[in-house]
Amino acid sequence: MEVDTPLLGHTGAADPAIGSLALDLPNGRRFLQTSPEFAMKRLLAAGSGDIYQLCKAFREEEHSPLHRGEFTLLEWYRVGFDHHQLMDEVTALLGLFWPGRTLERLTIAQLAQQVGAPDPHLSSTQALASYARECGMVLCLATARDRSLLLDFLLTQLVHVGLPVGRAAFIYDFPVEQAAYARVRPQLPPVAERFELVVDGVELANGYHELCDPVAQRARHTQEAALRATRGLAPPLIDERLLAALTAGLPACAGVALGIDRLLMLHEGAASVGEVMAFGAETI
Amino acid sequence: MASYSTNQFKPGLKIMIDGDPFNIVENEMVKPGKGQAFNRVRVRNLLTGRVIERTFKSGDSVEGADILDMEMQYLYSDGDAWHFMNTATFEQLQASAQTVGEAGQWLKGQEMCSVTLFNGEPIAITPPNFVVLRITQTDPGVRGDTATGGTKPATMETGAVVRVPLFIEEGSLLKIDTRTGEYASRAKEE
């Protein structure tokens, strides 16, 4: 079912790496959504079943050949799917754009091994910091101890070196620190059931086997708040309505967001997302 | 010295990395959908000329490099040091032969050069784009000899060797493009 959720919400993104745009309205402060994820999960908890929408999302301070402050997402959820079944569906969709192109699948640990990087699940923070320095990352005392940041660097480095132009791959089973809102599979080492699709070096989609446990979800928000505090960012407002929906019961499901501007950019062989938009950043 | 945030990064900005001055050649924002953003930059070491890649956490600050380009007149070389003068203040400074490097082969005296200063010390000399020099030695051109692409080597008064067309004779004045080290044209006698 196609759905349409509000662009304005009561809370901004809790993710410490995402900046939300705020609007001060007569009835209070509102935030432009950075993704329709929370609103769609509330619909799922209300019993919507499978849903999708094509919508705008907004992020603060993002402008580069691959970024726009305002961009278009295709986001959808499948009840009863896990992340592998959802990857199958993304593959089928992209087959319409690139008939015959193979989308590889490899775990983050396999990609790290291919590139000769430390294992992201098992390596010590110190080992991650030395690898980052070897790769030219400029670290200070604080960032050298920030495991989450070092893993983020490792991931961008793995994509930069391991998935260059010409390769198209799903990478999946993320370190638990990068679980975001994906469920964690309790094995040794535990992994987050999250995937990303990278085509020609460009991150095109991000999906989860969704976390349904409200207690775990609140714990993730607490971690995000702590990370925001150590990085000197404003504390996030917790979306209690999402937590209430999870408490009421989010059905087991998998969800994915796909960047439409980037998909068109790659498909048309354009050098930036701006080239496939009718209005350039300068002419809005 | 001022410090710069990564969101001020752009080609041409001079920053300090590990105690050396660098010039930003390329700046790319790496911003995953989830997770920390980074600035991946290609930077040229202004002391060695080597280009390397470095990554900064977006939002971090970096100390700016105290780099100044000054127009100065080349006076003379005493073998070890090359002497330059600020023609406005008549202040002089010396640059080592190593600092002058390749630029030295185009200089005979009086030329206005761009002297790059780091913390007040010269680290690079850029000669004028064009210099006029006299040929001190070149073999007579052999008519019809095209095997060498229609050029022959000529030694200039500064010692530089430039490939010139076959018809050019010893003692001629030539205009040379110092950026490519190539012959540009003949020059008129003053």
Image (cartoon, coloured by chain):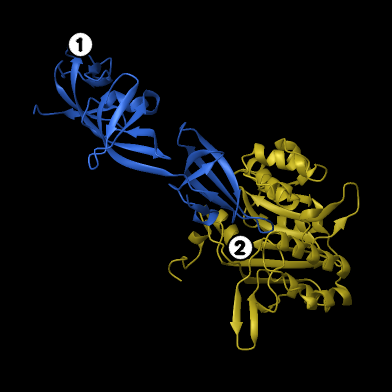
Chain colours: A yellow, B blue
Asked whether the residues under marks 2 and 1 belong to the same chain, the reply is no
- Which residue is at 24% across, 38% downward? B90
Element type at marker 2? helix
Q: Which residue is mark 1?
A: B139
* Residue A7 in view (yes/no): no
- Which residue is at 91% across, 50% downward? A187
- A185, above or below B161, in the image: below
Q: Nearer the viewer, residue A89 or B142?
A: B142
Where is residue A34 drawn, in percent x and y? 65, 69
- Which residue is at 70% across, 51% downward? A149
Q: Quadrant of the C terminus of chain B?
A: top left
Where is residue A279 drawn, in percent x and y? 47, 68
Relative horizontal placement of residue A60, taking residue A43 as reference (left or right): left
Specify the subunit that label 2 lies on.
Answer: A
What amino acid is labelled 1 in the image? Asp
- A76, above or below A231, in the image: below
Which of the 4 image quarters holds residue A196?
A: bottom right
Tag in front: 2 or 1? 1
Q: Mark 2 packing: few (<14 Cα in 10 Å), some, or many (20+)?
A: many
Relative horizontal placement of residue A255, taking residue B91 as reference (left or right): right
Specify the subunit that label 1 lies on.
Answer: B
Where is residue A256 drawn, in percent x and y? 73, 62
- B180, above or below A12, in the image: above
Where is residue B180 drawn, in percent x and y? 31, 30
In the picture as drawn, the residue positioned furthest to the bottom comes out as: A26
**Residue A260 disc label:** 2
